[in-house]
Image: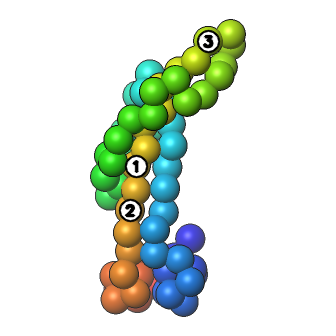
Amino acid sequence: DSHYARSGLVRRFVIKCRVANTRSNQVALRNGFVLEGCLRQAEYLNGSYDDQNIYARIIDRDEALEGA
């Protein structure tokens, strides 16, 4: 939420999604998030462990104010 970025309370936003979930990965990239790494076997779902991609976006206060 840009309110937190504008206030300076939060600068780092993180998205975690399964590697196999291509749509969620595309959403992260489309919104300016950068792939920081992959957590192997990080999520247990439907009887097996899946890898998760970690995306992050760091927003400085000036950038947040421009988007307001």
Name the N-terminal-most of marks 3 and 2: 3
Question: Helix, strand, or loop for circle 2?
Answer: strand
**Residue found at x 55% / y 30%:** 42
Quadrant occupied by the N terminus: bottom right
Residue that numbered label 1 is attached to: 55
Q: CA distance from mark 1 to mark 2?
A: 7 Å
Residue that numbered label 2 is attached to: 57
Task: Tell me residue 51's x, y (percent).
Answer: 47, 26
Q: Residues within 10 Å of mark 1 (few under 14, many from 20)?
A: many
Q: Between label 3 and label 2, give the one nearer the viewer.
A: 3
**Residue found at x 40% / y 56%:** 56
- Residue 66: image tag: none
Q: Between label 3 and label 1, give the one nearer the viewer.
A: 3
Q: Judge from the rendering whether residue 39 lies leftward or rightward of residue 26; answer left or right.
A: right
**Residue found at x 68% / y 10%:** 47
Q: Dots 1 and 2: beta carbons under 8 Å?
A: yes
Question: Which of these two is toward me, 67 or 14?
Answer: 14
Residue that numbered label 3 is attached to: 48
Figure check: 29 above or below 66:
above
Q: CA distance from mark 3 to mark 2?
A: 29 Å
Question: Helix, strand, or loop for circle 1?
Answer: strand
Question: Which of these two is toward me, 16 or 42?
Answer: 42
Mark 3: amino acid = Ser
Mark 2: amino acid = Arg
